């Protein structure tokens, strides 16, 4: 089980999210525990104030350090990552999500206003992550994105684990096109190979379509991970897929670790 502590000014934003679909299933199956911590509860200001003007002037308010530090210290333990979602952070991807799967506990700090005080980032934040090159009102939506991405990969949460393993970005490719009933819809038919019953040909068709789609829409992924080619009847690009190993997800690549600070 993984525990995610979410520090936020708006805990009620998470109520619907956590009570539906995959995040709820993960909690019901005992694979995920989410603790919502209201940062305002830790403010020493009599009005529970958590923001103030910037030193040096300029537009926008900044979250004050005292409530954040107190809230973080309330749940902080040795070797627990403290994640801060910010447009300045490393872009979130599936490999990053999988690295967090092997942890037992995570802290997420949801910022708001223009920024949080830099001293919190300097002292407490271990990982700064972005979900895209755009700006949101706060860190709550990125925290939900992250939690959902984690939840769906936990053991026994999705009924068919192979479904998750063939999603976009799992093996350095975008996902293949999918079809369901009816066979013909508004004059468009399902590709014949998918109803042929030849599973080898179906797998090959899906891989080819994934490669074509990735080259067309996200050529940067191909450039990063290498060209795909058929070797001894298997498609490879030199990157090992993630798979369970002694209860942990790994692809043979060592995760980032602190080294001399």
Image: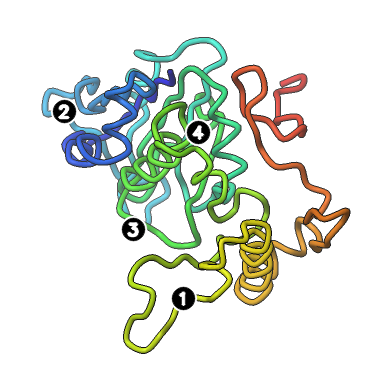
Q: CA distance from mark 3 to mark 1?
A: 55 Å
The spot of residue 23 in percent (x, y) is 31, 35
The mark closer to the camera, 3 or 1, is 1
Residue 67 appears in view: no
* Pointer 2 residue: 48
Q: Earlier in the sequence, mark 1 or mark 2?
A: 2
Q: Which mark is residue 121?
A: 4
Marked residue nearer the N-terminal end (4 or 3): 3
Give the answer, above or below, for where 200 lies relative to 188.
above
Q: Is residue 28 above or below residue 228?
A: above
Q: Position of residue 253 (x, y in %)?
A: 76, 34
Examine the rendered structure and indicate whether residue 194 appears above or below residue 73. below
Locate residue 209: give its quadrant.
Answer: bottom right
Q: Place residue 260 in its image quadrant.
A: top right
Q: Residue at x 38, y 74 (%)?
A: 183
- The residue labelled by disc 3 is 59
């Amino acid at each position: 089980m993984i525990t995610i502590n979410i520090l936020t000014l708006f805990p009620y934003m998470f109520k619907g999210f956590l009570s539906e679909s995959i995040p709820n299933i993960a909690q019901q199956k005992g694979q995920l525990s989410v603790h919502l911590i209201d940062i305002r509860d830790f403010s020493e200001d009599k009005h529970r104030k958590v923001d103030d003007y910037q030193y040096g002037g300029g537009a926008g308010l900044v979250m004050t350090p005292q409530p954040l530090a107190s809230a973080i210290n309330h749940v902080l333990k040795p070797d627990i990552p403290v994640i801060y979602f910010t447009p300045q952070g490393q872009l979130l991807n599936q490999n990053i999500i999988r690295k967090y799967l092997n942890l037992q506990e995570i802290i997420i700090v949801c910022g708001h206003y223009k920024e949080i005080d830099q001293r919190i980032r300097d002292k407490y934040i271990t990982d700064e992550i972005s979900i895209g090159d755009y700006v949101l009102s706060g860190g709550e939506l990125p925290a939900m994105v992250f939690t959902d991405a984690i939840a769906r990969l936990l053991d026994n949460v999705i009924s068919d684990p192979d479904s998750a393993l063939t999603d976009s970005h799992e093996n350095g490719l975008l996902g293949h096109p999918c079809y369901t009933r009816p066979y013909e819809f508004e004059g468009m038919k399902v590709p014949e190979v998918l109803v042929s019953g030849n599973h080898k040909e179906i797998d090959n068709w899906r891989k080819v379509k994934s490669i074509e789609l990735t080259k067309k829409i996200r050529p940067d992924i191909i450039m990063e991970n290498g060209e795909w080619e058929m070797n001894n009847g298997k498609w490879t690009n030199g990157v090992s897929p993630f798979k369970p190993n002694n209860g942990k997800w790994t692809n043979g690549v060592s995760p980032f670790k602190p080294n001399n600070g």
